[in-house]
Amino acid sequence: MFFSHCALADEGGVSFWIPGFFGSLAATPQQPGWTLATIFYHTSVDAGADVAFARQVSRGQLTVPFNANLSARLSADANLGMAIPSYVFATPFLGGQANILMVVPFGRSSASVDATLTGALGPIGFTVSGGRSDAVSGFGDLVPQFNVRWNDGVHNWMAYATGNLTVGAYSQQRLANLGIGHNAIDGGGGYTYFNPQTGHEFSAVLGFTYNFENRSTQYQNGVDMHLDWGASQFLTKQFQIGLVGYVYKELGCDSGSGDRVGCFQSQVVGVGPQLGFIFPVGEMQGYLNFKGYKEFAAENRPDGWNTWVTFVISPAAPTPSAPRRMVAK
């Protein structure tokens, strides 16, 4: 959901939230009980000199003022798995349905920078070329989340709150990390229109992230805004097809004594297709979703493409009992 330095300006072009986590049916009610979701997430991104330079600065590679021209390219890839156990309460909460979950991310992240720096330190001119690559495998930050959903016919609403526990693999000296190195809190709300009779569905979730200072680098990201959306048509009761997208934008400026790149606000937009399947798994219900995003309009942030494969096992909806036949004597 919200980790992996290589995948995702904010510090070095990295944000807490991974755009695209929410999608279709985000606000619809769930069946009470335990649910297990697993997600495979792959991303491949590139960035120009602004992000490559910022990533090097965040690693402590440059600490003095200078005048220079930088030709650089950052490339990064990540393959992440996410195990997401959750529990939906049967007892109403504030008139809605509450559930808690924990995102447990794990996988591998890699990043590389190739650069040529031409400039001067005082009267001394220089040209430096070189490359650097890093990779890390392990666990990312744990992410607990609390959601409440309300339903009124075809209209559904959701509110959520989340944050991170900074236990993931992180080092300020690496280009690639699985943790983000600082705490963050995030909250927002969403809406889903879903008409089972026509199969029409549309969902959107808007959220905001407040980032605390990274004490290793004395760098603090600005406030981030993210909007995830999905639109689909159920061609049958078990098969859906549609589109997904997101808009991510940093609203506040980066700050802190370790900020040597200025405001460094970032943004990115993504859009792509999706397919979904619902099927029985014994007495449970399975849901399999494939979606992908192509990114564009990026500023101070790597952009590229990413794919998601989600598999969920949850309690099946109860089957309506047949009406009892009246026998007249």
Image (cartoon, rainbow, N blue to C red):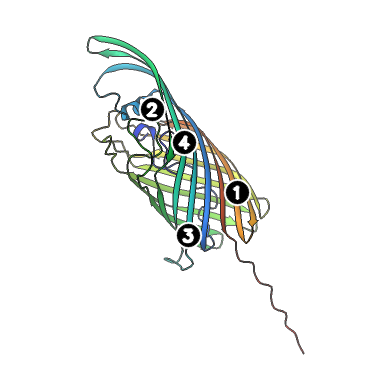
Sequence-first disc among 3 and 2: 2
Q: Are marks 3 and 1 in contact (CB under 8 Å)?
A: no
Which element type, helix, strand or loop, lies under badge 4? strand
Quote the CA–CA distance across marks 1 and 2.
35 Å
> Which one is in front, 280 or 276?
280
Q: Amino acid at mark 3?
A: Tyr
* Residue at numbered disc 2: 51
Tell me if 231 is positioned left or right of 322 in this view: left
**Residue shown at the point (29%, 30%) measured from the top left:** 262
Q: Are marks 3 and 2 in contact (CB under 8 Å)?
A: no
Q: Residue 280: x percent and y percent? A: 65, 57
> Which one is in front, 191 or 300?
300
- Residue 259: quarter of image: top left
In this rendering, the label closer to the viewer, 3 or 2? 3
Quote the CA–CA distance across marks 4 and 3.
28 Å
In this rendering, the label closer to the viewer, 2 or 4? 4
Q: Amino acid at mark 2?
A: Val
Sequence-first disc among 4 and 3: 3
Which mark, by number, is residue 108?
4
Sequence-first disc among 3 and 1: 3
Q: Would you place residue 259 above or below residue 232 in this image?
A: above
Sequence-first disc among 1 and 2: 2
Which element type, helix, strand or loop, lies under badge 2? helix
Quote the CA–CA distance across marks 4 and 1.
23 Å
Quote the CA–CA distance across marks 3 and 1.
19 Å
Quote the CA–CA distance across marks 2 and 4.
21 Å
* Residue at numbered disc 1: 288
Q: Amino acid at mark 1?
A: Leu
Q: Amino acid at mark 4?
A: Arg
Q: Are marks 2 and 4 in contact (CB under 8 Å)?
A: no
